[in-house]
Image: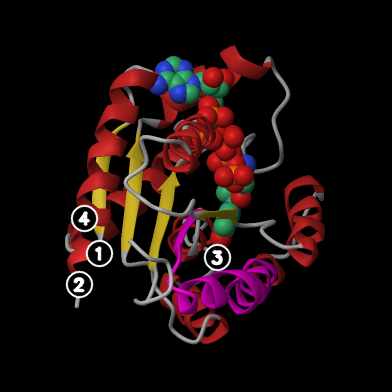
Amino acid sequence: MTASSRHGLFISVEGGDGAGKTTQLGLLRDWLSGPGSPLRYPPVFTREPGGTQLGAAVRETLLHSEHVDPRAEALLYAGDRAHHVATVVRPALERGEVVITDRYLDSSIAYQGSRGELSPTDIEEISLWATQGLMPDITVLLDISAADARARRLAGRGETEDRIEAAGDDFHESVRQVFRERAAAEPHRWRVIDASRSVEEVFSALKLVFTTEIEKWAERP
Ligand code: Z5A
């Protein structure tokens, strides 16, 4: 398959903190960049916040500041997204490449929208304005309960948590429910994977999703 003759494929991966995105995206990168890949060219792997130099500074500020005003926080995520889409995602899609992002707009609605301070509709509209309406073709949700995800995070890293990770299970369970509701409302875009299983089982489900979606994309006129 050439990387130039068609519009690219845009896939986001979402999930609560500790759902295993980093682990699974590492496996995905190895697979899609190696000899067994269904792609001729390796995909662009990127993330939010922090997929650009500007984004890295925004990420540092957002995750490690003691308090960020909710509107400022929503705008900073949207600002990071605007720059990320304009300089990384859209150019790669226009070159016909596959772009895989660790988090995108749905994270803003799930996280900034779950505190009860801002309207999820406003948050979505800000991001749609920022990205000129760019939505992923496919969004994969790694779905796990807040309690299971916290147990994993603590087992993996000890007691150190950033500002958002340190919010309680109620907050993280609300985040999960927003992702699940959005997945149920837009089944053509979302693929939900039970992330409470072993690393190997989750990766096997993820591989199936990617193989299927890459094949469908390759068959597009
Ligand atoms: N955020 C936001 O609020 N608004 C927005 O618009 C955007 C983001 C875009 C940073 O995201 C933060 O930004 C995030 C939301 C907010 N919240 N926080 N904090 P991030 O994606 O960079 O960070 P994260 O979601 O917190 O990722 P993480 O902590 O690295 O978790 P993860 O990637 O989902 O999990 P992991 O590191 O792969 O795994 C966690 C541990 O579990 C680790 O020890 C693994 O070895 C272990 N693990 C992984 N999979 C398994 C399985 N299957 N079984 C057992 N153990 C496992």
- The image quarter in which residue 74 lies: bottom right
Which residue bears the numbered disc 4? 215
CA distance for labels 4 and 1: 5 Å
Q: Position of residue 93 (x, y in %)?
A: 46, 73
Residue identifier under label 2: 220
Residue that appears at 37% across and 41% down: 37
71 and 106: which one is in front? 106
- Let me know if residue 23 is in the magenta part: no
- Characterize the magenta stretch by its predominant secondary structure: helix
* Residue 7 visible in this rendered orientation of the protein: yes
Q: Are marks 4 and 1 in contact (CB under 8 Å)?
A: yes
Q: Say which label, 4 or 3, has the lower sequence index.
A: 3
Position of 166 compared to 151: left or right? Answer: right
Location of mark 1 (residue):
217
Residue range (magenta): 75-101
Q: How far apart, in angstroms, are the residues tagged by discs 2 and 1?
A: 5 Å
Instruction: Quarter of the image for the N terminus: give it.
Output: bottom left
Numbered label attached to residue 117: 3
